[in-house]
Each structure stands twice: as C-alpha cells, then as structure tokens.
Amino acid sequence: MDRSDNWIDRAVPGFRHAAFSRRAFLAGTAATGLVGALPRQSYAQSGAPVDPATIPGPAWSGGTRGGRGINIWLDGSVNFDPLLAFGRADYYNLSNFYRGLTFLALGSEPQLDLAEALTISDDGLTYTFTLRDGVLFHNGRAAVAEDFRWSIERAVSPAQASWVQGFMASVAGHAEFVAGTSATLAGVTAPDVRTLVIQLSSPDARLLSILGIPPFYVLPREEVEGLGEAFRETPVGTGPYRLQSYDGASSQIVASRFEDYIYRDHLPYLDELEIRWNVPADLQYLQVSRNEADLSMAIPSSIVGEIKADPALSARFSAENSFDVEWWPLNVLKPPFDDVRVRQAINLAIDKTRLATFGTNPTGHIYPPSLLGFDQTAPVYPHDPDRARALLAEAGVTGLAMKIGVLDSASADNARMAQLMVQDLQAVGIAATIEQRQETSYDLGSALVDEYDMWNMGWGMGLPDPSELVSNLFGTGGAANFGGYSNPGIDAQGAAAIGITDRAERAAAYAGIEAALLADAPFLFVGVGQLNSFRSERLQNFAYDPALWTYWDRYWVTDA
Amino acid sequence: MPDAQPSRRAGRGRLRPDAAIGLAIVAFFVLAAVAPGVIATHDPLVSLPNGLTEAGTPRPPGDAGFLLGTDVLGRDVFSRVVHGAQVAVLIAVVPNLIALAIATLVALAAGYLRGAVEVVLMRLTEAFLVLPLFLIAMAVIATIGPSTATIVLTLAFVSWSYPARVLHGEVRRLGNAPHVEAARSLGAGSLRITLRHILPHLTPLLVVYFSMNAAYMVMLEAGLAFLGFGVQPPAPSWGLMLADARDQFFRPWLIIVPGLSLALLCIGLSLLGNLSERDTPFNSRRVLL
Amino acid sequence: MSLPVMLRRLAGRAAFILLTLWFVVTLTFILTFAVPTDPARAIAGPKATAVQLEKARAALGLDEPVPVQYARYLANVLRFDLGRSHSQRRPVAEIVLERLPYTALLALSAITVQLVLGGVLGLWSAVRAGGLMDRSVFLLSLVAVSLPQFWVGLLFLYLFGFKLGWLPLGGAALPEGLVLPALTLGLAGAAWTARIVRSTASEALASNTVLGLRGRGIAPRRIVLKHVVRLSAGPVLSVLALDFGLLLGGAVLVESVFGWPGIGKTAYQALQQNDVPLLMGTVVVGSIFVLLINALLDVARFALDPRIR
C-alpha cells in the first residue's frame, strides 16, 4: 500500500521528512565555510568504468536489475550514525549506505573496496592506500582522502568515545589523540586527494579487517556536522543505496539505487531497498512465507522444525552461524565453583545437543566456527553425566544447589535452554532453580555474582577477530567478564597474539588460548547464536557472512 | 434487623442454573489446584523421553498418548495446564482478599470520618479508577522485580478502587438505613455503628465482588505473565504458557489450551458472580484484560 | 446548569486532573529510583567504554540529593521533558508523541467497534426481550468479557492472518492492519455496551414517555432510534469514560500481540530493553491521555443527557 497516504503521517506533521530537502539547504550554507575548501566534482566527471573483478564481496551473475527488496527486523529503533548503530536493523544495514577502504567478503575476509591499491611497507608499519577515482557521496560531492582521514579520526576521537575507539590503538599517535593531548590522529594522513597513509606504532594484523567494519567507513563531514542529531536518521555515504524516505512512526526506511555509485554499471541490482524494523519475531516468518517481505534473519527457533520438514520452505531457509557468542559464566570466585572439577562437571552434565533447537549452534566452543583460531579438534566437553558425577564426588560436593539467572527474558529461548539445563543438572544431583529477569546481564554487570551461580551471556562481535573475545570475555577485567575470571597465562598469550602478522601462526596462537580456557572451564561453554534466515520466493543470490550479514547490493528479485 | 436488606433477596431460594454451572467450573479448578496429582497424567516439569517427535517438534493432541499434546520442551501440556490452576487459584484469592480489605477500609474510613478525609479518599479512589493501571502495574513490577509478593501486592494495588467506590456508596446508604437510625437514637457511637451495624451488612456485596474481582485478577496476572512477569519457569502458569506460545502458529494447541483454561475459569467466576447479580449495579467494572 | 456552576465543575475537574498527574509523576520518580540497575550503563550501551560511562553519569546528575533531583524531575515534566530513552538515544517525549497517534487511532477504532456492535446488539435484545436473540446476546456477552484479550488477539492472528490469510499478520498498514487489533480491543467493551444498552433500553421502553409516544401512534422504529438511544447514551458514556484507562491497559497487550506501533507496544519494548525513562514516559503520557479523554467524555455526557443537569 502507499504509505504516503497514511492517515497518521498527514495528521502529525513532522513525522516524516524528506531527507534531501534539508540537505539541499545545508549544502548551500556549507559551501561558504569549511566544505568550500574541498574539491567539488560534478556528477558527469565521476571516474572511469570499474573492472567488475575488483569489486569486493560475494559473487553474482545473471539476474535482472530493478524491483524492490524488503528486509524486516526485530529492533525497536534504529540509528544510522555508524558509531551509534548498536542494533541489528541499523548496524547490519550500514554497508547499504556507507562504504570504506576495505570491505568484508565471505569468510569475513577483508578486500579492497574504495581503495584500488594498497602498499604495505616491509616493517608492516606503513599502509599506503590509493583511492578509486570517481567515488561520490550521495550528495554529489567527491569523496577524497581527507574524508577518509577525518572519518577514521572521528571514529576514535575522545569526543565520540565510541566502542571502536580501542580498535585503532596500534595507529601512531592514538594514545595522545585519545587523551586529548593531540588535536589530530597523527598516524593517519592524506598527502593528496587520492592517497591515504596509515602509520602504525606496532604491527597489527587486524588493520584491514578493522577498516572493513562499518564504523570506519567514509562519511561526508559537512553532512555529519550540518545534520547534527538528524544524522542518525539521515544516512549519507558512498554506498549502493541512498536514503529516499525515513519514517520513524511507521518504522520504515526506503532507500533507492544510488545512480552515481562507484560500481553503478554492475550494482546494486534493486531499484529500491525497504528496511522495516519493529516487526515481532512471530510475525516475521508469516510475512516472509507470504512474500510480504523478502528477508528475515529472526525466524523463531520454535518453528524451524516445521520449515525444515517442508521441502518448498526449507529451500528458502538456512540456519547461519552468527558472531553472537553464547556462554554461561560460572561464579568462579565462590565455592564450590572455584573448584575446576565442579566447573568441568557442569560442562559434562549438560546435553548441549538438546540446546540446538533454541536458536543456538551448541559447538561447545567460545569461538564462532568461521573465526580465526577456531579449532575443530579442540577438546570440547561431551555429554557425560557419569564423569560429571565422578568429578563432583572427587571434589567432595554433594547436595549442591545452584541459582541460574536468565537475563533478558525478551528471548524466550534463554529460558527454554535454562529449563533443559535444570533437568540435566538434576540428573547429576545438582538442584538448580531459575530466576528470569528483564534486564540484560550488562545492566546488572558486577551485581551478577551477588545473585547467581550461573547466568547467560551473549556478545555480538564487532570485529571479525578473536582478540576481541580474549580481551572482553575472559581477559582479566574484560568488559563482559562479570564473573571475575582471571588467568594471567591467557592474558599474556592474548597480548602477544595481536602482533603476530602471519595468519596461520596467529590462528595457532588463538587456538592455544581456547584450549587453555576449555581446560579451566570458567563457564558453561555453549556456542554461537544461530540466525534463522528465511527468504521470500522472489529473493535470489542470497549470501551471508557473520560480519556484515547481508549483501543487499547483489541480491535480486525475480519479478524485477 | 438485617432481614430488611435487599441484598438478601437473591440468596433466598434455589441455586440458579447458571450459577450452578459456574460453581461446577470453579470447583473443578479448585480441585486441580489443591490436588493436581489426581488429575494430571504426567510430571509437568519434566521433558518426557517420547515428548518430542523424531524431528524434534512437539506432539499434537492425542499423539503418543498425550491428551493435549506436548510443548517445545517435550512436556505434557494437559498436566501443565492442570498444575497451572494452582497459580490461577492463588491469584484469584490472595490479592483479591487484600484488595477487598483495602476497599472496605477506605469505604468505612470515608464513611466514618467524613469531611476532608472522605473527599481525599474518594478522589484517590476516582484517580485509581481512571488511570491506565495496567501500564502502571507494568512499570511497578518492572522496576521492583517480579517476585510473587510484588505481583500479589501490585494486583491488589490496582484493583481495590472499584469495590471501594461501590462499598462507599453502600456505606452512605446504610448510614441512613432504619436500623442504623435506630442504633444512633439509642446513643451508639459512630465507630460502634460503623463496625457493628454497617460492616456486617457489606458482606453480601463483598461476596459478589470477590467473585467478580477474581476473574479480573486471573486475567490481569495472565496478561502480566504474558509480558514476562509471572512465576519463574519451569513452574507451569497459563500466562507463561501463552507467552511461550506466541510464536507457535504451527502448533495451535499450545495457544488454544492454556487460553481456554483461562477463559473457562473466568467464565465460571463470572457465572458464580451472577448468583446475586441483582445486587450489583449493571455497569459493573468490566474485565478487559 | 448555570455558567458559574459549570465553571466550578470545570475548575474542580482540572484540579483533580492536576493532582492525579502529580501522583503519577511522583510514582514514576520513586520507581525510577527503585531500579536496581545502573542507569548510566543502560544509557551508554553494552560496549560502553569507561569514559562513556562517566559522561553518562555526569549527564544524569545522579550525585545530587534526592529532593533536588525530585524538584528537577517535576520541573522537567512540566516542560514536557521526559528525559532521554537509552535504547533509542533520543528524547522520550519525542518517541511517545510519535507513537500516541497510533494508540489514539486504535482506541478510537476499538470504541467504534464497542459502540456500534454493542449498541446494535443491545437494542436488538431489548426490543426482542426474552427471545432467542436476547438470550444468545446475553450468553455471548458473558463469554466475551471472560476471554483474555491477548489470547483473543492470538487466536484472531492465527485464524485470519495465518490460516485464512485475509488480513495482515500485524504491523501498521492502514487500514487493513487496524481491523484485528481494533476488533480484539473492542470486543469486551462491545459485550458490556450490549448489556448496558439492553438494560437501559428495556427500562426506557417500559417508561411512561415511550408508552405515551406509542399511544400517540408514533412508529416503534422511530421511538427506538430517537428516544431510547438518547436515553441509553448517558450510562454508556459514563462507563466508557471510566473504562478508558482499562482500554489503554488492554492496548498494551493488544499492541504487542499485533505489533501495532502505539505507546503500549513502546512500553513493552521499553520493558524488554530495561529502558526505564521510556517506560515511565509512556506511563506519564498514557495517564495524561486517559485523563483528558475522560474529561472530554464527561463533558459529552453532560451535553447529551439532560437528566444529569
């Protein structure tokens, strides 16, 4: 239906705004100030044709360009400022609006995107990017090296204090800039309009991956500063789609093909991409099954069995491993959970395969399967109640009662899994009770250990690299390490692994860390969250990767 | 003497047929609450070995001997519904009694003290009648935390106002009743009159409101449980079962069965309330949730 | 009613509304302080750095004495500043006002269902008192008021959305997305309206006025439509006014079942995300909304029913 005919939109002026009328006004005022100094390039001049072989990301071929795709999400709200996008509907749509120096292809592998060439000095400290010619922002201005420099600087600036600030810690001058003693990030420079240089103070194998995540994509400074708060609902970047309309009241964004997109001769396929949020999980399946929407990544786990049983439906379904790590920390400082045998017994007591029904891939690992360092042969805990009982007896523990906190009851699956755990623990003589809370574990933080012996945790990885898990989840004092686990050996191994430049060597180092952690069993190892992805009959060429989730620029629809 | 009371009229004679049906329904649920083991066929808390199909999905009603099927964890739905009566009956009684006690206290205090106290109490009552109490109850439970005590007190907190207003009207009416006039002329103090000559005459109204309010309580609690505030899993509660079933369109029995139990109990309570319907104003507080 | 009396009534009404609001606002203030979690953490987000947390704490002024915070809270509410939502990172007032029209539309539609369906069935049973229709309406209304609304919503969604595919499975599409939520929310009200109309209309039909009119040979159809409806309007409106708060409570559940983006669903989301300022904002705005509608219905009742004057 035509949403511009929406009664409420007309009744309450100001809900809906034409994103670009305001921008036209701002462009006029900005021209006299700061932006006036930047080179302007007209639409007609933009660049030579791009060789499709240099376009990063999953493959495509065939299909017809045109049509509209509809992507539905659970989130209650969105924020398209790349530094403030914390939800799924916003974060995993950023790459539709913005692009950066690199892009994460399948396997979360970084590939050059808006940079056409890169040279790395022999010491691994100087990265020199040559930018593609003809990259335009949605407002028509050419994106130049200064824009890339400014965008990276903004992402780590003390004023933003964003969650990605620490990712650039290896860049020269990072500490001074973050502390406020330097006004600029000295290690990032733009010697000419098409050259960007990043100078590191110590080798960092993660740099190209870091540049490939949306918070480091390039932004037009005049729009970000001119729009102010409105920037969150007015994404302006260099990406394949540009904002057409933002309707907060209807929880819906319509974006249209960016006619001057750098890869315009090939991508995107769709004329229009519609993003709707605020769609309850129970309705997402129904909408997609009736082709009222094209893609849901939040199909409730409870209906997966029926979908798989139907060949027509199962062809449109896939369960994807996410980067959402799921683990249930134990209160390691409190007896008897300070005894490693008790912790191992709990890991052995619980039948993880039964948890698979509930939106989880119970790998028994802490690393997601596609992550660097994931080792298929790692000694994960099998379901072995007899050994669990033996270990408990060996530790001299009898009649143990434990209280399990189920945080964030927004997800019914956590409570369902906890109920199965209670049954399994009962079988080895542990009497467990459940307490469900609305709050997330992050809301309660350090208060968790005062109330529970075990609780559920989830961490959505921002960077496709295991270093983030080491420092945050189980490193001493880590941001999500509310159980207070501390292992100096693991801390030291983690610090050393960041600087290793050889990929295989790094993978081995991180595998070693996971093995040490498994032996120590500071939590109940569960696995990763599974995204139940379900597509309409129209949507083609679906590809998924846990870092960026979707690649809407290369999906097409059959009735275009 | 009290036989002058109109409210006694309905109590006279035989039990009306609709009230008898209500009584039977309510009695069934009370039995289920008191002795669930007698009716239930399985342990309501345990995932049964054959509780799920080969594909890992719940069993539909009648399959593999499960009368009303099984849930996503492979537990027997019939047994869970029977055990769920416990929570429902508890909620129908405890917060209800507290609410009626508050209502009686407010009505008597207003009627006894009169003046400014009466004005303030009745304005407060009116405010509680008008406000979106479910929203407020949600906010209260969300911030204080959903323990059984919080839920019971919150339910009482949001449901005393309607009976208070009706009881207050009755207290004022009784204040002018012949037997009260008589007592007053004999020199009885107003506190004595309130306690001895007015309070006992509120009983018939209280009985009616107990029954009507009970349905309201049960639905309120189910609504709160549906939003995630209720007893803790794995304990069976109808509201919780419904909350767990909202994404279960492929397994309609998981939606239908607990809701039907809820509706049946509420219908039973409403019918029972009709026992002396003539005594209540026709526009009795309706139950919306 | 003379003008001064009318004015005094209005002044009394306004004072009542203000006091009630003060009560609600104070309650939300107390509740906000009763929250066991760190609001700064919730505002700054799960991946917040220490700097962000510090900034959030300072911005909230959590170090000031409670009376100072209370005074500031009241002053803010007076300026309709309801704080910032930490899940949506924007002003609560903005979010709630954006959602309110949806709830208003839903409530209006539900009331329409309630009045039309309830009115027609009630009049019908009154006119054909004791007949089959009368008895079935009585039975249906008894059942309808005993059904939990969110369950009815789920059943409607299952039947009309999933099984039959006639109507959308939730969402804010107009007008088709409104049908099921409005029906669900209006059903219990319709049952009550039917009972009230049945009762007042029977009374009116037996009244001397109506008997007189019939004696003068006026068509029964005309009598029912002109006089009986008018006499029933008062009691129906007074119940409507009283129950508007209940209607809004029901909207919380109905909106979250159907994904209808009103303030009820916003409250539910705020709850799930532990967004205390947003939750309290929905309580305050919901209360203002209910009180205003109530006052409005009160005025309408005076205008319609000469007996009250």
Image (cartoon, rainbow, N blue to C red):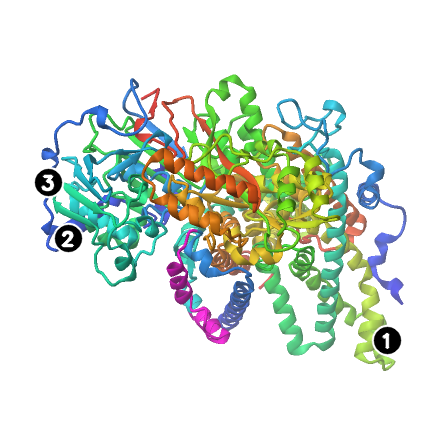
Disc nearer the start of the sequence (3/2): 2
Marks 1 and 3, how far apart in space?
Answer: 100 Å
Closer mark to the observer between disc 1 and disc 3:
3
Give residue C5's position: percent from left, percent from top.
Answer: 53, 72
The chain under label 3 reads: A
Query: For the residue labelled by badge 1, is the local secondary structure a helix, a strand or a loop?
Result: helix
Query: For the residue labelled by badge 3, is the local secondary structure a helix, a strand or a loop?
Result: loop
Marks 2 and 1, how far apart in space?
Answer: 89 Å
Are circles 1 and 3 on residues that touch, CB within 8 Å? Answer: no
Task: Name the residue: 85% across, 80% down.
Answer: B188
Closer mark to the observer between disc 3 and disc 2:
3
Q: Which residues are magenta?
A: C47-75
Residue identified by numbered label 2: A30
- Residue furthest out toward the bottom: B187
- Amino acid type for the residue under numbered disc 2: Ala
Residue identified by numbered label 1: B182
Crowding at mark 2 (Cα within 10 Å: few <14, some 14-19, many 20+): some
- Amino acid type for the residue under numbered disc 3: Gln
Q: Identify the image quadrant of residue B162.
A: bottom right
The chain under label 1 reads: B
Q: Which part of the image, by quadrant, shows the N terminus of chain A?
A: top left
The residue lying toward the viewer, choosing from B18 and C116, is B18
Are circles 2 and 1 on residues that touch, CB within 8 Å? Answer: no
Closer mark to the observer between disc 2 and disc 1:
2
Residue identified by numbered label 3: A41
